[in-house]
Image (cartoon, helix red, strand yellow):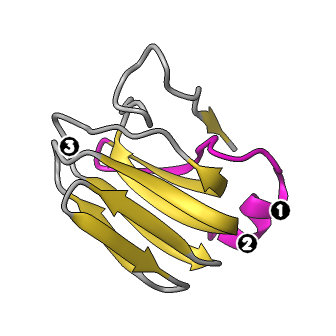
Amino acid sequence: MDAINLKQKLQGFSDHWSPKIVSKFNGHDVMVVKAKGEFTWHAHDDTDDFFLVLEGNMTIETENGNVHLGPGDLHVVPKGVEHRPVAEEEVHILLIEPEGTPNTGDAATAAQKQEI
């Protein structure tokens, strides 16, 4: 059994807003993503949305106010809350969500997740 080096995984791709699955945990996808710019406003009706910033800074805009995150900060957006992540510069994020959860809250518009 090998350790998973998140920095190494992040070096393996350059696309933004495209979560990469690095592990599975009790029916959940553990993912890394690079983000830059504004994501779409969306909500997840059936699950909370977990964000842990590994490198860089971002803001999670929500219908209830904005949350600013830097390296080592995490935030959980409660299910059903409209939100959108925004990053002026590239940010690296760890995400954990139930397997198969679309990143836009809608399978028709979601990015395809790839295991790396």
Please indicate, yes or no, whether residue 2 appears anywhere in the rendered image. Answer: no
At label 1, which amino acid type do we have?
Gln
Residue pointed to by mark 1: 11
State the residue in front, 67 or 55.
67
In the drawing, what numbered circle is on residue 54?
none
Where does label 3 land, which residue? Answer: 47
Q: Is residue 16 visible?
A: yes
Q: Quadrant of residue 35?
A: bottom right
**Percent from the top left, x then y, of residue 52?**
45, 71
Is residue 113 inside the magenta stretch? no
Residue 64 position by quadrant = bottom left
The answer to whether marks 2 and 1 mark residues whose Cβ atoms lie closer than 8 Å is yes
Report the residue at 82% width, 50% height from top.
13
What's the CA distance linking mark 3 and mark 1? Answer: 29 Å
Which residue extends farthest top?
Answer: 108
Q: For mark 1, does the 10 Å Cα neighbourhood hold few (<14), some (14 to 19), or many (20 or more) residues?
A: few
Answer left or right for 106 relative to 114: left
Amino acid type for the residue under numbered disc 3: Thr
Q: Which residue is mark 2?
A: 7
> Is 23 in the magenta?
yes
**What residue range appears in magenta?**
3-27
Give the mark count: 3
Query: Looking at this view, is 82 or 114 the one in front?
Result: 82
Q: Amino acid at mark 2?
A: Lys
Mark 3: secondary structure: loop
Q: Are marks 2 and 3 in contact (CB under 8 Å)?
A: no
